[in-house]
Amino acid sequence: MSAASLLASKRVTDPAAFVDRLVPGAEVIVPIANGEPVHLLDALEANADRLEGVTVHQMHALRDRPTLHGAYGERLRHVSYFLSHITRPCFHEGHVDLVPNHFSEVYDLIRRRAAHPYVIAAASPPDQHGNFSLGVSADYVASFIGRAPFFIEVNDQMPRTSGRNQIHVSQIDGYIETDYPLLEVPPAQPTDVDRLIGGFVAERVRHGSTLQAGIGAIPNAVLAHLKDHVDMGVHTELISDGLIDLIEAGVVNGVKKANNRLKVIGTFALGTQRLYDFIHDNPTIEMWSARYVNDPRVISRDVDFVSINASLAVDFLGQCASETINGRYYSSSGGQSDFARGAAYSPGGQSFIVLQSTAKGGELSRIVPQLSPGDVVTTVKNTVDMVVTEYGVAELRGRTIRERTRALIAVAHPSFRDELTATAKALRYL
């Protein structure tokens, strides 16, 4: 059967066409962020009374919906792998579950618990060969291609991207056609303090390095400081607006990369319409599964790999609490530890944890003697390389506890240094 015939046979008009295929206890897997198939999930909820023990697995949901608030009880529940501003309050209310994870391992974690996986995903319109692109996503979902049934929501406004996020019409149960804009998430605007931190990092980044930059104003500030670098590469989980200018200016060309030379590699894209237009049919950009992109063993093959990630607090030992605030869950681990470990194994690699020295308008120090009770360690002390605030760079890797403590106090806000020093002496760290 030709691709055109297959496409005609798999096209349906009823978004609920896949619901009958869900067995009791089915695990519905949904891509991260804008990879979510809005109308298919609407249909799932509309038919919740027909479901029995169905679980939706997703990282970083961007749209609010009744399932997240426990509207359907045990018939339909949501399991998150990274809390967003939408799912965070639902988790605290007990309606959403959270699985601790490294992003590189999310596919394996879902696969381990899912006896009956079923993937629903948004995609770009198919090409003439019958291939759909998962567009702004590859994440954990691309790893299910050929390993689980798929039902696709074709969105005319989904960018067509290349890489390992392609699925042929013969590999899906069916698809519907839709047309709606992707949600935009404007990049966080750096403050003067953020730009100062970004400058400290950028001056240590060598020409020809391969970059990973996480979410937040400070990673964006670092990218903005790299406009005079040459022959840079990108291998990162998040493709963001901050990379566009560097790619267009030729700063990022990938000629020094060991992995996917000449290509910008990511596992999902999230930003503004400018970003979505930029990645559409752009052969420079490739989306690969998180099992590959975030694998520390893959990351380590690039020389001079640079990892840049934000944290919320760092203690004297170097432990980074990047997903909780005062013991209360805020997000999850994401790929921070994946990339920090990969950079540590890379020849000449560097890993930067970035944060402003204070919080709450200067009332609280983010450099602390010990983490708060209940705070979760995202990147462990043995992996942390450098911690950067607006007061400089604390080099921790291979340092003693005494040396770490001194270095971290030196980059703390001056108004807290005496107090931190006194506590360090009481702890016998100094």
Image (cartoon, rainbow, N blue to C red):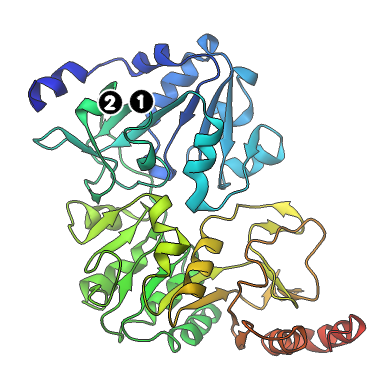
Tell me residue 407's x, y (percent): 69, 88
Quadrant hosting residue 181: top left
Quadrant hosting residue 405: bottom right
- The amino acid type, in three-letter code, at marker 2 is Ile
C-alpha distance separating marks 1 and 2: 6 Å
The residue shown at (28%, 26%) is 172
Tell me residue 326's x, y (percent): 76, 59
The residue shown at (49%, 35%) is 111
Is 119 positioned to the left or the right of 323 in the image? Answer: left
Tell me residue 215's x, y (percent): 48, 62
Quadrant containing the N terminus in the rendered view: top left
What residue does disc 2 label? Answer: 172
Tell me residue 410's x, y (percent): 70, 90
Q: Local crowd at mark 1 within 10 Å, few (<14), some, or many (≥20)?
A: some
Q: Tell me, yes or no, if residue 154 can be seen here.
A: yes
Whether pointer 1 and pointer 2 mark residues with C-beta atoms closer than 8 Å, the reply is: yes
User: Which comes before the other along the chain, label 1 or label 2?
Assistant: 1
Q: Nearer the viewer, residue 71 or 407?
A: 407
The residue shown at (32%, 33%) is 146
What residue does disc 1 label? Answer: 149
What kind of element bears circle 1? loop
Is 402 positioned to the left or the right of 247 in the image? Answer: right
Image height check: is 313 above or below 14?
A: below
What kind of element bears circle 2? loop
